[in-house]
Amino acid sequence: MNASRVAEFTFLGLSRSRPIQLLLSVLVVLCYAATLLGNILIILTVYIDPHLLKSPMYFFLANLSIIDTALGSVVVPKVATDLITYSRTISFAGCMSQIFFLHFLGGSEMLLLTLMAYDRYVAICHPLTYTTTMNRPCCIRLLCFCWAGGLLHSGSQVFLVLRLPFCGPNEVDNFFCDVPQIVKLACVDIRVTEILMVANSGLLSLVCFIILLISYAIILTTLQGHFRESQIKANSTCTSHIMIVTLSFGPCIYIYPHPFYSFPLDKAASVLYTVTTPVLNPFIYTLRNQVFKVALEKLKGRQGKFTLCL
């Protein structure tokens, strides 16, 4: 295993300017608060409303919100703390933990988004068999497969990193620990490790993205010629999913499928999938989904009745 002499890593961060750091800290804290509020609201709405909970699409959506809440909590609190306290270091164990949970949750989310596309494909292209195909035991098994796939993906990434010796330097050209920046600090030739990691992360994101594009292309083609009301409703759902897929997969496809060279937009892409995407997911779904808006109104009504009783 790792015979490292490096006890901690130092982040170069997003900026060295103190005023800019304070401004960024405010923005990051606001994004994190919105992430927690939006995703927890979706989880509560789905699990309180029995009609939504019985629907596979909303069951998967609630689990996507659980992943986004956890994913946003892996990096963002540490980033906000570093910006406020002007700290730029992380322990070796903390760095490995960030890599593990980032890839575990990120890999699980990619597989879950692919599963959600399959759910929409069955619902729209095979509506007569939808209730039997996507029954609750089947949904739970598929969801467990997503979590297991994320765990396998993350475990293999961390295993490859831990096998590398780190003798210095210890400066990470980012604001959190991720595989592309960490492996470049190893004291050995990392070409084989790079190939294995690109095959792991790059192929996972690229293959899932291609499957998603094919699925939604089939769905949109199938919708042609259907009743206008049904087509508008399905188009709205698919559009929301496609927006989420683009936000989730775009930065990963930019960063991981190529050898680990630095590009000018690497940090911007990292900000997008660690800070921005978890906060945008709930807003995209709730603002474009009429069924969810109705469920939110019911939840507000229940809260109002509860307040009156008190």
Image: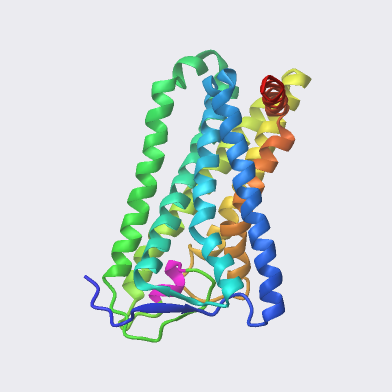
Percent x, y for residue 25? 65, 67
Percent x, y for residue 97? 38, 62
- Residue 113 visible, this orientation: no
Q: Which residues are magenta?
A: 177-183
Up-down relation of residue 242 to residue 172 (above or below)? above
Up-down relation of residue 165 to residue 223 (above or below)? below
Residue furthest out toward the top = 128
Quadrant location of residue 185?
A: bottom left
Quadrant where the image shows the C terminus = top right
Report the residue at 62% width, 49% height from top: 35
Percent x, y for residue 225? 73, 21
Q: Is residue 49 left or right of residue 291?
A: left
Q: Is residue 175 left or right of residue 105?
A: right
- Magenta stretch, overall SS: helix
Quadrant location of residue 48?
A: top right
Determine if the magenta segment contains residue 180.
yes
Report the residue at 44% width, 46% height from top: 108
Report the residue at 50% width, 52% height from top: 71
- Residue 44 visible, this orientation: yes
